[in-house]
Image (spheres, rainbow, N blue to C red):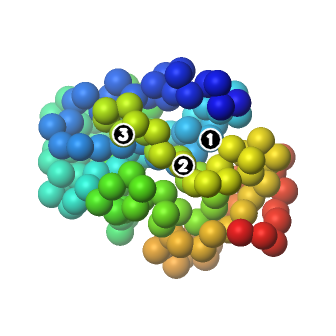
Amino acid sequence: MINNIQNLKKVGFDILKNFNSNCWIAGGAISDFFSGRERRDLDIFFPNEESRKAAVEKFVSMGAEILTSYPLGERLKFKGELYDLVHLGNTPKQTILRFDYSVCCAAIDKSGNFYYHENYFEHLGNKEVHYIGNHPNINFKNKSKRLQSYLDKGYKITSER
């Protein structure tokens, strides 16, 4: 699995060049890539609200449609693909430390640097969902949906962090 890091840019990395600020891809798209699954959407993170809002404006000027706004960002549709533009931490490391499950805790920044949770590859390889409890979203309905999504993909819940 770790040998695939060289191919990680195929996740959708090229879209980042459209934004003037630093930004990074993180979360499920990377996990899906390593697991050989087709990605459902692409989460792009920005270091502050200003750069995130500027990216939304840029995306819209390129033809994207805003589907919904939520507390951490916006969901857009562009050329048939779904994108979430989010601010959740000032750096890729801060972002993944704020995620709820270790199997989501991976990011690749605009420069091609790769960041991940210390047990990311072990948990991903074993298809184990480890709750690390750091995500600021306290909407338990959303957390339950995310957990169910992993269970549907064949992951198992563990009580360890």
Left or right placement of residue 135 versus residue 60 in this view = right
Label 3: which residue?
Answer: 109
Residue 74 visible somewhere in the drawing: no
Q: Which residue is mark 1?
A: 31
Q: Looking at the figure, which quarter contains the C terminus?
A: bottom right
Mark 3 and mark 1 lie on one chain; the one further toward the N terminus is 1
Instruction: Work out whether residue 114 or residue 68 is closer to the camera in this orientation and state it.
Output: 114
Secondary structure of the residue carrying numbered label 2: strand
Q: Residue shown at 42%/56% (left/top)? A: 93
CA gap, disc 2 to disc 3? 12 Å
Q: Looking at numbered disc 3 in the image, what kind of residue is underneath it?
A: Asp
**Pointers 2 and 3 in contact (C-beta within 8 Å):** no
Q: Which residue is mark 2?
A: 116
37 relative to 144, above or below? above
At which x and y percent is residue 17?
25, 28
Please identify, in this view, whether the residue under mark 3 or under mark 1 is nearer the observer: 3
